[in-house]
Image (cartoon, grey):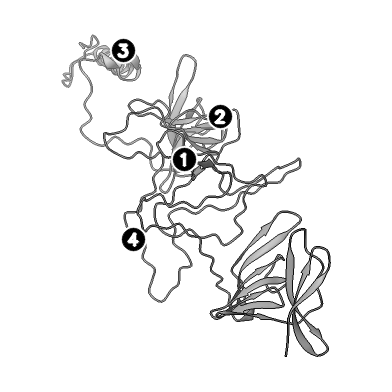
Amino acid sequence: MAYTNSWDETAPAGTDAISSGDNEIRQFKLDIRERLNTLLAGGSALANNTDPMALNETTVVGDGGEEDISIRFDGNAQDWHIGIDDSADALVIGLGSVLGATEQLSFTTTTITFNEDGGNYDFRIESVNNPSMFLVDAGENTVSIGGAAPTSHGVDFIVQPPARTADANEEYYVVAIIPTTAVTIPSGSTSALVASLYISKPTATPTGILTAAATLYIKEPADAGNSNYAIWVDAGNVRFDGDLELPAGGITTTKSVSGTSFDGLIVENTSGGISDGARIRLIAANPGGDPYISFSSGAQVISVGIDQSDSDLFKISDASTLGSNDRLTMDTSQFVLGLDLNIAGNFIVGTEMTAPGAPGSNQGRIYFEDTGGKTQLMVIFASGAAQQIAVEP
């Protein structure tokens, strides 16, 4: 722009009157005021300036002394300031006219801090199609990726991706943890564990009733695929150091076994190969522990497994453990039925016993008993009558 208060920059002649010099000083002051007003008035005056002042060298604000320095922006409804908090060696941007009164953003040599004063100010990052790609909601104390923070239930961190179209013929994951570099364990040291995801138990102080707590909770299985799962382990072993507890009401499934709907725990190999089996393997790492399965109807308990304390015999017991009330014992050479009868090779071996009680209707019980020092093979019928089959010669 053209400035109206011009002044003569040449040195006045020695014969000039003092009034002339005084006039030049007044013109100089008016010119400086007009230029500063044009530069600092802001808004359209600065934006429309056709003759801006060029800064070709470093401009220094402050004199290096121990003092705060700030610039205040006087807004219509809200003032802002930017400056240096010298006591904290921090560059501060905040609300109001007083430096540091309401800090919004501060920079130090080691830290960048948003919302230093802990006010109710959200931090939000937009993407091309999502206005809340990353959101720290101060009022809800929540970090959200992909959407607004929820207000209906307690969540500290939530991922809620917006609707999108996946790339053609590509898998899609809401969250993916893909380590691409190796973790080096220093030579001579021991690392107990390296994992892609570590989750520790939640902490709670229930002054009321806490019905259940879980370190990992999966609400429901997927339902949009041809096959749907709540958990899919694509390869490798699955390890549980604690108990694997099934719901009290059992597992209900619509899986069909031989054309019949089956409710319960199913082990199924779906690979389809003729030689592919479905198996459960129980391994007791402790030499004194027994790998076994216990079945209970409430009134009756049957246990099946290997009794390591008894020469690794395979047993069926009518108790909750093996070695007590064993009803079938098997090793590589023989079957032992109950306590008094076993099958070894091609023959049956029985032990003398007291006559058992009568069986049910249309049944008979065969047993061995001692009579006069001789072993007899006997049968007892439902009536209670006993009949000798053979006697020791």
From the viewer's perspective, is the residue at label 1 or at label 3 nearer? 1
From the viewer's perspective, is the residue at label 4 or at label 1 nearer? 4
> SS for tag 1?
strand
Give the residue number, with chain letter if any, for mark 4. 182
Residue type marked 2: Asn
Residue type marked 3: Ser
Q: In which quarter of the image is residue 252?
A: top right
Separation of marks 3 and 2 at Cα, in angstroms: 33 Å
From the viewer's perspective, is the residue at label 3 or at label 2 nearer? 2
Front-most of 385 and 180? 385
- Quadrant occupied by the C terminus: bottom right
Classify 60 as above or below 343.
above
Give the residue number, with chain letter if any, for mark 2. 120
Give the residue number, with chain letter if any, for mark 1. 113
Front-most of 259 and 174? 259
Local crowd size for mark 3, using a 10 Å CA cut-off: few (<14), some (14–19), many (≥20):
few
From the viewer's perspective, is the residue at label 1 or at label 2 nearer? 2
Front-most of 227 and 354? 354
Separation of marks 4 and 3 at Cα, in angstroms: 56 Å
Q: In which quarter of the image is residue 182?
A: bottom left
Give the residue number, with chain letter if any, for mark 3. 44
Separation of marks 1 and 2 at Cα, in angstroms: 15 Å
Between discs 4 and 1, the one toward the N terminus = 1
Local crowd size for mark 4, using a 10 Å CA cut-off: few (<14), some (14–19), many (≥20):
few
- Quadrant occupied by the N terminus: top left
Q: Are marks 3 and 2 in contact (CB under 8 Å)?
A: no
Between discs 1 and 3, the one toward the N terminus = 3
For image coordinates 38% across by 57% down, the residue present is: 276
> SS for tag 2?
loop
Between discs 4 and 2, the one toward the N terminus = 2
